[in-house]
Amino acid sequence: MADLHVIDHPIVVSNLTEMRDGATPSSLFRKRLRTITHFLAYEATEDLPIAYKEVETPVTTTALPVLSDMPISIVSILRAGIGMVDGMLDVLPDAGVGFIGMKRDEETLKPNEYYVNLPVDIAKSKVFVVDPMLATGGSAIDAIAKVKAAGATDITMICLLAAPQGVEAMADVYPEIDIYTAALDETLNEKGYIVPGLGDAGDRIFNNL
Ligand code: PRP
Ligand code: URA
């Protein structure tokens, strides 16, 4: 069974409070999201494989740990996932980056896919799928289906906020996929928004709303 990791570090929760505040402008919202993404990435990469290489320090030569050459891919669910890409790349600078465009229908809350572009070595990669919001879970579930169809088997979901409904839906479809989030919120409202949430993440990142 997959694990839900809620990263409620003091730096994370205080940055998240600023993001939830509707008066926070997009410029600051993006900065806080980048900072929180560092912490989520740090936790989600804890088990990355290590290799050893000989390094000449100024004092001696010794075998020291480096990341193994296993490929890593970050897959961003558009639009809002773009807000997490730079934070992920700060931690994983050699990762490939893919994009899956998903837009929820406002009436049915079902996602419509409009773009897919995945790294060439995705099948061999450790994959981190990023999207700030896991609401009903529909967008993440469909995006992960694309990643799996491309051959990936080692997949982790990273989001900023999760609703219980989205976590449950993910666990039903992908019981093997761990989820990392900064908070598990209370519920969804009648429009499918996470409560207390932060509003429309894409608009908060890009539209100064
Ligand atoms: C938002 C969000 C997720 C999705 C979550 O995107 O970024 O992708 O909703 O909802 P779900 O879990 O119920 O599927 P949206 O569809 O609004 O598109 P956008 O990022 O372009 O604004
Ligand atoms: N998508 C968002 O951007 N916000 C929510 O609260 C739910 C889905």
Image (cartoon, helix red, strand yellow):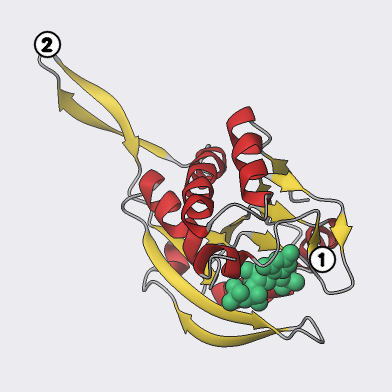
Give 152 or 98, whichever is nearer the viewer. 98
Query: Where is mark 1, residue-wise?
Result: 169
Q: Amino acid at mark 2?
A: Val
| Mark 1 vs mark 2, CA separation in Å | 54 Å
Q: Residue furthest left?
A: 58
Image quadrant in which you'd find residue 95? bottom left
- Residue 174 in percent (x, y) is at 73, 64
In this rendering, the label closer to the viewer, 1 or 2 = 1
Considering only vertical position in the picture, is 9 above or below 128? above
Query: Where is mark 2, residue-wise?
Result: 59
Give 149 or 76, whichever is nearer the viewer. 76
Q: Amino acid at mark 1?
A: Ala
Image point (67%, 50%), residue name: 21
Q: Does the rendering let one see residue 57?
A: yes
Residue neighbourhood size for the residue with mark 2, other residues' Cα within 10 Å, grouped as few (<14), some (14–19), many (≥20) = few
Image point (25%, 24%), residue name: 63
- Residue 188 in percent (x, y) is at 85, 63
Q: Is residue 106 left or right of residue 76?
A: right
